Amino acid sequence: TPAGQWIIGRGYDDNKLDERRHPNRHDLDAATTEHPVMIVNGSGHLSAVNSKALDMAGIRNGSPDPQGGHFVVDEHGEPTGVLHETAQQPVRDQIPVPTVEDHIEALRRCNDAYVASGITSSQDAGSLTANHVRAYQIAVERGVLKLRTSMMIRETLIDQLDGLGALQGFGSNRLRIGPVKLFIDGSLIGRTAAVTQPFLNDPRDDNLGLTMMPKEQFEDYVMRAHAMGYQIAVHAIGDRGIDWVLDAYEKALTAHPRADHRHRVEHCGICRPDILDRIQRLGVIPVTQPVFILEYGDGFIRHLGMERIQLTYPFRSFLDRGIRPVFSSDCPVSSFVPMKSIQAAVTERTGTDQSYALEEAVTVEEALEMYTVAGAHVTFEEDIKGQIKAGMLADFAILEQDPRDVDPSTLADLGVTTTIIGGEVVYER
């Protein structure tokens, strides 16, 4: 890489490093001072950068924390290079913007990997710019994107949507506009999710996580998107964050009643019993990622303790209350392979085989339904996909074995032999 050009990496988990900490600018400076470096945590909610990147972004001693973010500093007030949540943005603003062709190539690679794992439909969890939307359309036209895709549109594009008059579902069964997407908090693994009790094993004894914007502003976004007729999907992991989301949904539904809104909580991590009751009463859909347990569960236990772990990702409790959860991956935060999520939901064991919330386990059949039938329902497409039967789109995958007949602890290893979308074989091993 020529001197001065960016070096960017992603995917580390500080809980799996020997030092049990994030890399800092000194660690990265030891690797290079000629290049700006940004290493993104696996969660995507925090990063480590070197001194050159800090200088380019103008982050220095005394720089105030942005709303929804935190510059980690040492005992002298000097930035360590660890950036939480929105504090990453000043550095990201220095990185060259990908072109439309860059996005199309990324979509091609994602498509090929996804269909090889048996995925036939996907949801982009945050189309943020016009170039994102444009790249999707061109990728479909060129035939490099076979996946059926719903684009979640970020709240910053609401004005453009309103001006265009485009409603949810606009497009085709290949590419369509999906819900409006917002973020309200961070992550459990990064200890930035908005919680009601402080995280454990944290440098700050009173760390209750972060919220991405003031509550009034957040509720205004929700009210406006709901009044426009959109389904809303909000990233909320901590129980305090979920409280905010349910408060906003309740206010919007009171002001503008809608029977079949299917508003969503993306992740829905820490769910107290009263949160479960409100989700049921409001008809909200939790969209969860069991693979988090497999890939990050050991860190969750360290940051929350086993008592609070019993409140996290409560699949069985959802079902027992008549709530219809949806399973998904949250790639690139975690693996997109569905069978990994299904193994985690069925076994409730972490990557080191530690017991998690065992009482929240579901059966293989239930897990498959949450990926297929429930996945189609949450996008208002249950009439055309999600099941293999006459009149439905011919979208399905063929596995090596019946997942009901294998050892649950080996489900993640169960391979795909064929993937078919719209009657077309898009992957064959």
Image (cartoon, rainbow, N blue to C red):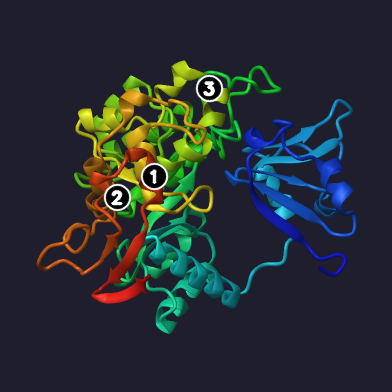
State which quarter of the image contains the C terminus.
Answer: bottom left
Residue 341: mark in rendering: 1
Location of mark 2 (residue): 371
Q: Residue at x 53, y 60 (%)?
A: 128
Identify which amino acid the numbered label 2 is placed on: Tyr
Mark 1 falls on what kind of element?
helix
**235 w.r.t. 273: above or below:** below
Q: Residue at x 77, y 37 (%)?
A: 64
Q: Nearer the viewer, residue 73 or 421?
A: 421
CA gap, disc 1 and disc 3: 21 Å
Residue 6 horizontal/vertical position (percent): 78, 62
Residue 304: mark in rendering: 3
Residue 362 left/right relative to 111: left
Residue 71 horizontal/vertical position (percent): 74, 37
Q: Answer yes or no: is residue 257 visible.
A: no
State which quarter of the image contains the N terminus.
Answer: bottom right
Q: Are marks 1 and 2 in contact (CB under 8 Å)?
A: yes
Identify which amino acid the numbered label 3 is placed on: Leu
Image quarter of residue 78: top right
